[in-house]
Image: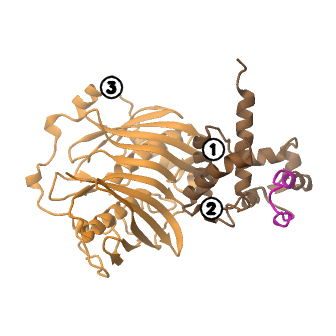
Chain colours: A orange, B brown
Amino acid sequence: MRFLFVDRILDLVEGKSVRGIKHITADCPLIVDQISKPYFIPSLIGETLGQLTAWNVMTTNAFKARPVAGIVHEASLKRPAFLGETILLESFIDQLDDAAVEYHSTAYIHDEPIFTIEGALGPLLPMTDFIDDHLIRTQFKQIYRPGVFSTTHEFNSLFNSPTFRGLSPESTKFLDPADKLRDVGEFRKPEEHPSFSFDRILNSDPGVSITAQKHVSFAAPYFPDHFPNQPVLPLTILLECIRRLALSFIHQANFNAKYRLHTFKKIKMKTFVHPGDLITSTLSIKEHTADLLTLSSQTELEGKRVCVLELTFLKEI
Amino acid sequence: MNLENVYPKVREIIADVLVIDESEIEPTSRLIEDLGAESIDFLDLVFQLEKAFQIKIPRGQIEKNARGNLSEAEFEKGGELTPKGLEVLKAYLNEVPEAYFKPHLKVSEIPMLFTVETFCKLIISALNEQKTAEPVS
């Protein structure tokens, strides 16, 4: 698995804006459930938008520094990106200097915004701490193929035609093992997909809180690209782990309702998490109304807070 | 605009950024030593303060304000404050107790001294500058 998600950069105005595409194919990390067609892991749409922005920042500063995950005020999922679809990615830089980039981004399918990022702030760090100059420039050359699409209609005609729609629900024969719910203390079974989940639940107080643990292993497929000189756990992988933990929490709480993820909010990644680390995340209810459920998440490493965020789920009617 | 005007909002924002209770915050609280802020929190704090007060806070503004009329060469050498630089820094950060200013203080260590009041002063300065820059109709 590669952890480089932008398939092509369509246009780029240094320090200002960038557009690109991402195809959702069977090579992508997908969620398979019993409800719908397979879809791209939601937080990785955000990862793709972040990577797109990073390409703009890096070309603007001649590949001297790269942004890393820092803060996101709000990331909203409007609907999933299904297998067979192509996402049009757009990112706008609000402020860029030597220390950080501020940006906002949107992912579209068929003119429809499916994922938005507001108030993102990424600190800039020296490039060679993470990846050699030659390699990052090569990666850029591989995907920078500007194309001219006068209208989104033109774009959709090419990339989102009906013949490119992907599998029907009937053809999906398996359940994503990582969505299986586990009991307290039970270790993840070897056949489950290891890298996008916590390994085990340490404590569960149904309807109140849940705590889980993850051993961060160098064997995970995202480390070779993220990054060659300094492997660090991608924020968006941690978001996916937390999303799955939240689903476990919701199921165990027995709320007598179905919920779907709506937003990640107030995301802050305070420090890097490396292979060999052991992280613990705790979710608790921040707000629970008739229509929505907001959970607070705190992730710690050796007793120190490394990531905080909130997740909001909407009750499905 | 004075400390009393800006402090409540600044305290609210700091509490939100550091995920702590407002009751834990005093004007004299040092953001790093007392409240546990990290470098990403400083970025977040400046971002939130800019939005809340509709101002721009360029990076390194506190150091620039502290430096006053001194040139960079007079203020620091090889990353360490000169005696003159330390003197003007103490004068600017007059809300910070004398004992916290150690000799051979590095420029990179200046943020360790910042208190909640330091940020309030920064905002007041930015608001006043903005007002001065406004065209007279």
Q: Nearer the viewer, residue A155 or A103?
A: A103
- Looking at the rendered structure, the secondary structure element under dot 3 is loop
Residue B121 at x, y percent in the picture:
74, 47
Q: Name above or below for residue A146 compared with residue B82.
A: above
Q: Name the side, left or right, on which B72 lies relative to A162.
A: right
Q: Residue at x 87, y 56 (%)?
A: B86
Nearer to us in this view, A231 or B132: B132
Q: Earlier in the sequence, mark 3 or mark 1?
A: 1
Q: Which mark is residue A113?
A: none
The magenta region covers B89-103
Same chain check for tags 2 and 3: no
* Residue A55 seen: no
Disc assigned to residue A149: 3
Query: Which disc is residue B37 wearing?
Result: 2
Disc 2 and disc 1: Cα gap in Å? Answer: 21 Å
| Residue that carries the numbered disc 1 in the rendered image | A98
Q: Which one is in front in this view, the residue at disc 2 or the one at disc 3?
A: 2
Q: Quadrant of residue A85?
A: top left
Please, is residue A314 above or below residue B104 in the view?
Answer: above
In the image, taking residue A168 as reference, residue A9 lies left or right, namely: right
**x 22%, y 53%: residue:** A316
- Residue A110 at x, y = what percent? 25, 34
In the displayed structure, would residue A205 be above or below residue A84? Answer: below
Viewport quadrant of the N terminus of chain B:
top right
